[in-house]
Image (tube, helix red, strand yellow):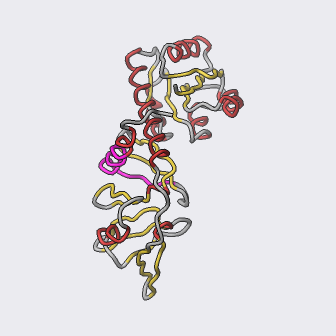
Amino acid sequence: MLKVIAVDDEPSALSDIADRIRGDDRLRLVGTALSAVEALEIIPQRKPQALFLDVQMAGMSGLELAQATKDLKVVIVSAYSSHALDAFEVDAIDYLLKPINQSRFQEAVNRLVKAVDLEAALIRARPSRADSSTTLVTAGRDRQLIPAQDIIAVLADGDYAQIIPANGRSMLSGLSLKQIEASLLGEPFLRLDRSTLINLSRLKSFRTVDRVKMRLFCDGLDGSMLIGRKAATTLRNHLAAGLKGKTPE
């Protein structure tokens, strides 16, 4: 069961969403809050995995709360459709309009469960760091060998490839993406599409963006990396394959 907290400054609306959460055996309501500030106070103690929250609230808004709790999944519940674009800016799993339709609520829960399961699969299936193999990087006349374990991603750049190293600026390699992929000998590297190769051992978490794209958060990467539909689908399928035959923790 996923642990969730409901947040809404209208008591009747809070009671409604709380009852729906209690009625779904995939969810466990671990707290409710009548303001974003109150939610911030109880989150460290209750340790939820997701928030169902309103947007317009006195003081701190729901969107500000979502930005302050980026490690948590978010489902927006609002009386206004005008905040939908803002919701996707904070990588909300779904956007429910009040009064809540029960079938739409169940659809949102389906998406939430799937997102959490995929991240759990990532943690279970994350391979060990790459071995001691290296790849060639050029910088003008200089040549540099980069340990595979220090590579976060490799991106195609014409006939060559940009290497994104941990805690450093991207560098142009004298090799193509295909040549680098061959030299890295498979896991923990995964080819996502024609132009993207990632080191799964560096991947910490991800968030779906605009329903089809994905933002990746990696160890050693300042910020995040955005990937498109095809690459995101490849990663989801890879992680989903790891879920088969396994019982969720």
Looking at the image, how many numbered discs can be counted on the residues? 0
Front in this rendered view, residue 75 or 183? 183
Task: Measuring from the top left, give residue 147's x and y in whole percent.
Answer: 48, 72
In the rendered view, would you say 98 is above or below 64? above
Image-quadrant location for residue 58: top right
Residue span colored magenta: 224-238
Image-quadrant location for residue 55: top right
Q: Does residue 234 appear left or right of residue 2 in this picture?
A: left
Specify whether residue 236 is painted magenta: yes
In the rendered view, would you say 150 is above or below 231? below
Identity of the residue drawn at 33% across and 69% down? 157
In the rendered view, would you say 72 is above or below 152? above
Task: Measuring from the top left, give residue 143's x and y in whole percent.
Answer: 44, 84
Image-quadrant location for residue 112: top left
Front in this rendered view, residue 240 or 85? 240
Identity of the residue drawn at 52% across and 32% down? 74
In the rendered view, would you say 234 is above or below 52? below
Identity of the residue drawn at 49% across and 45% down? 123
Q: Is the magenta stretch mostly helix, strand or loop?
A: helix
Front in this rendered view, residue 218 or 188? 188
Identity of the residue drawn at 41% across and 33% down? 114
Specify whether residue 79 is painted magenta: no
Task: Measuring from the top left, give residue 160's x and y in whole percent.
Answer: 32, 74
Task: Measuring from the top left, give residue 139's x and y in whole percent.
Answer: 44, 81
